[in-house]
Image (cartoon, grey):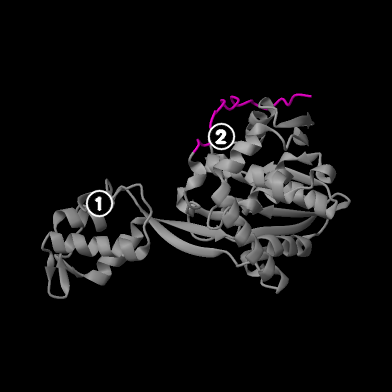
Amino acid sequence: DSPKADVAPAPQEQPQGAAGADSGACSARGAADWSQDDLLEFCFMQAFKVSLDVEKALPVEASELYEKHMKPQRPEGTALDVKKSSHKQIGKFLNVMRKAKVIDVIEKKGVISVTKVDLGHKMFAQMQEKYARDIAATSSTAAEAQESAGSGVAVAPPKISTVWKPTHYTEPLFKAMGRSKSDLYSWEDASKILKAYCEKENLVEGDEVKLTEDLLAILFRVAGGQKKDATFPEKADFSELEDKLQDRMQEHTTIEVSGVGPTTRKGPPVKIEVSLSRKGAHNITRICNLEAYGLDVQSMGDELKRKLNCTVHIEDMPGKNVKDKMLQLQGHVVEELQAHVLAKYGIRESFFSVKR
């Protein structure tokens, strides 16, 4: 059967292996040198060569293949994200492999599953050659990880950091210092840029900074709403300027989760919100903010459905232009949920807000 999902173009024939004849001649690439398309291809190969027992594990759903077998095969320091690849969706990537006759797939009720894989296909040989050094490096890392797991070492907890983006008020400051208004900055970097600007413009006078019209517009004046009799100081301490700068920067939060990578979103840090309630004759667990931790709601729902053998429902969060989803599980299963994400992602109870 042929899946109904959008089909991406089939890969073109490459005579010297998937990456050319000399790909295996260099050492394993660093984390920053991986493209998402290469990561996807590499993890696909490793999933069938290393993770899956093809005689027993097939058919396997696309989401399970991606989350449980492809993601764990990523090289150290990388984060696999199919949405950042040219394929955009795991279903489209699998359709490329289907058209190349590497795998067979079926689709039932919107769920794509891999039913068969040809491990003798020439594309596997090409990928094996293309990623020879990377395979060796990953095997070494996996062995070390297995030793750590055997010794009871837990998955590292998420790392949370705050970064700042210029607003229309502060854009001129960053532009004057040759910095992009679209980039995100640590507070230390933003403060250094402000200090460098004051020094460049010769505004530093002892312990104070002289306030020019440009600096007043950047940090003090309100666009279009200034009172006629408003007055502004001629000088200010640098610490006061830092406070004003922070007030006029847009706060963002980066949360880096083990096995997922960093996710940056506008606003202060948020917790995974869980509410326990009753709907009719059933207990219900509702979960929000999974996306802030880089977790795919559909994949998480599929995992918990199999693990807990419960009914799963996914809804859009209320509000305009809101792309986040709410995951609803049958039963009060907050302890099981927390145990699952702790074991797999290192997300501790302190990252949850539970309303009972």
> Foreground: 330 or 277?
330
Towards the viewer: 216 or 147: 147
Classify residue 204 as left or right of residue 243.
Answer: left
Task: Report which quarter residue 344 is drawn in.
Answer: bottom right
Element type at marker 1?
loop
Q: Please state which amino acid type lies under the numbered disc 2.
A: Gly
> Is there CB contact under 8 Å for labels 2 and 1?
no
Marks 2 and 1, the one that precedes in the sequence: 2
Residue in the picture at 51% in, 64% down = 160
Percent position of residue 4, x then y: 71, 25
Above/below status of 180 relative to 275: above
Residue matched to label 2: 17
Along the line of sight, the residue nearer the viewer: 25 or 238: 25
Q: Position of residue 49 (x, y in %)?
A: 70, 46
Q: Quadrant of the N terminus?
A: top right
Q: In the displayed structure, does residue 337 sit left or right of residue 182?
A: right
Magenta segment includes 5: yes
Task: Indicate whether 228 appears above or below 20.
Answer: below
Q: x, y (%) of residue 265? A: 49, 52
- Dividing the picture into quarters, in which one does residue 148 lie? bottom right
Instruction: Tell whether 249 sits left or right of 148.
Output: left
Tell me the SS state at disc 2. Answer: loop
For disc 1, the neighbor class at 10 Å (few under 14, some 14 to 19, many from 20) is few
Question: Secondary structure of the magenta portion, mostly?
Answer: loop
Can residue 317 be seen here? The reply is no
Residue at label 1?
226
Q: Residue at x 89, y 51 (%)?
A: 281
Magenta range: 1-21
Q: Residues within 10 Å of mark 2 (few under 14, many from 20)?
A: some
